[in-house]
């Protein structure tokens, strides 16, 4: 036989633990063992939690304590050959007793009457003899089989019929499953759970059935620990389903095609409109540029005419002044010459 490194390592660890346990038992003089598997009890019944000393020896003189998470207060305390109620948890008073039929051989059994949901979980049986003490763990699983599911129609929803399944008194939290006549699982629309003061679960699950050919649907509530379940079915008559007129059915198939066609036409029209808009904008831009060039040309011609007129005006003024300058000597001579002659 060939062992892998992991398996050989695990084997060595197991040997080490057995060696330590044997050594510790030899030091303390005894060890305590509990049941190899968890103990399953129906809600309301009695639970028996056994523990055994090894090697066999009397435990009548020992201090025996059953507890949950802390040594005190405890579920049950046995000391000096009798029950000690001073350290007992309130919720276990009047519901526990120690079965001592085999106590002289090291075997004791804690009996819990009328098991509740709160009793579910881990227990430790602790034996103490002088300075030596040992303990073992016992797992108690409480199973609550609640009411059978109640299934009823809620009314029309989303083109189908909504049905609701509810049940009370389950523990721990159960599984809810819908199925059709062929046993095919159906998906719940919604699920929720609540717990009452006794920690028992109330569950609700809804389903929308749109296929009128299913006939009926079944709601199953299953306990996750025991696998036990309860189921109820409901018949869904076809007339109860929302009916669609033939023209509506035809329209339902035609409308999507028409919508796709309209979308295609609209897109094509939009593309053409965009192209036309771009062409119009281009022509407007070219026309604006031509008008601008024409206006600039006209302004240039106008400025040229104004400049030409100004030059002509200045030329005529210049010629007039020039003529005056030419005539001035003759005019002066004519005007002042006679006066000079007479004075002489």
Image (cartoon, rainbow, N blue to C red):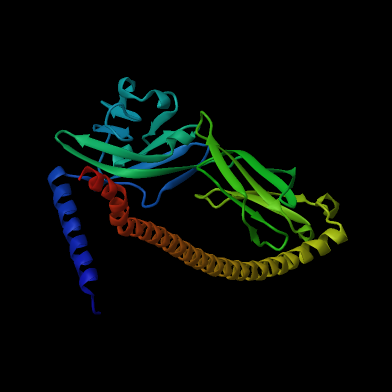
Between 225 and 274, the one nearer to me in the picture: 274
| Location of the N terminus (image quadrant) | bottom left
Q: Is residue 217 above or below residue 283?
A: above
Along the horizontal axis of the image, is 256 left or right of 16?
right
Residue plotted at (27% across, 31% down): 71
Answer with the quarter of the image where residue 134 lies.
Answer: top left
Picture coordinates of residue 228, whole percent (x, y): 58, 50
Along the horizontal axis of the image, is 276 left or right of 199?
right
Residue with the most extreme bottom position: 1
| Location of the C terminus (image quadrant) | top left
Residue 240 in sight in this render: yes
Between 276 and 49, the one nearer to me in the picture: 276
Along the horizontal axis of the image, is 331 left or right of 55?
right
Number of callouts: 0
Q: Is residue 250 above or below residue 335?
A: below
Between 77 and 277, the one nearer to me in the picture: 277
Residue plotted at (12% across, 46% down): 27
Picture coordinates of residue 36, whole percent (x, y): 36, 52
Q: Is residue 85 above or below residue 216?
A: above
Between 329 and 144, the one nearer to me in the picture: 329
Picture coordinates of residue 328, whole percent (x, y): 30, 54
Picture coordinates of residue 139, whole percent (x, y): 38, 44
Residue 147 in sight in this render: no
Q: Is residue 192 above or below residue 180?
A: above
């Amino acid at each position: 036989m060939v062992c892998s490194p992991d398996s050989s390592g695990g084997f060595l660890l197991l040997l080490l633990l057995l060696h330590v346990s044997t050594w510790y038992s030899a030091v303390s003089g005894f060890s305590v063992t509990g049941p190899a598997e968890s103990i399953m009890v129906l809600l309301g019944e009695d639970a028996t939690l056994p523990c055994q000393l090894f090697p066999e020896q009397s435990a009548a003189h020992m201090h025996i304590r059953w507890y949950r998470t802390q040594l005190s207060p405890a579920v049950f305390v046995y000391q000096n050959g009798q029950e000690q109620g001073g350290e007992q948890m309130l919720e276990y008073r009047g519901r526990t007793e120690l079965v001592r039929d085999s106590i002289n051989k090291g075997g004791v059994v804690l009996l819990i009457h009328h098991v509740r949901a709160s009793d579910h979980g881990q227990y430790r049986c602790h034996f103490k003899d002088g300075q030596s003490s040992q303990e073992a763990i016992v797992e108690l699983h409480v199973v609550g089989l609640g009411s059978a599911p109640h299934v009823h129609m809620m009314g029309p929803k989303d083109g189908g019929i909504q049905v609701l399944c509810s049940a009370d008194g389950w523990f721990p939290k159960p599984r809810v499953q819908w199925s059709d006549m062929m046993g095919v699982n159906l998906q719940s629309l919604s699920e929720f759970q609540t717990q009452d003061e006794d920690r028992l679960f109330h569950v609700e699950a809804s389903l929308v059935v749109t296929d009128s050919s299913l006939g009926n649907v079944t709601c199953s509530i299953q306990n996750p620990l025991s696998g036990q379940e309860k189921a109820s079915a409901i018949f869904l008559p076809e007339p109860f389903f929302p009916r669609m007129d033939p023209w509506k059915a035809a329209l339902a198939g035609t409308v999507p095609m028409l919508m796709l066609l309209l979308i295609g036409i609209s897109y094509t029209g939009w593309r053409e409109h965009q192209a036309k808009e771009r062409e119009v904008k281009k022509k407007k831009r070219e026309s604006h540029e031509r008008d601008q060039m024409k206006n600039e040309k006209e302004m240039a011609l106008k400025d040229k005419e104004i400049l030409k007129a100004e030059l002509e005006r200045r030329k005529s003024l210049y010629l007039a002044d020039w003529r005056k300058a030419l005539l001035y000597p003759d005019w002066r001579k004519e005007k002042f010459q006679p006066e000079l002659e007479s004075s002489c």
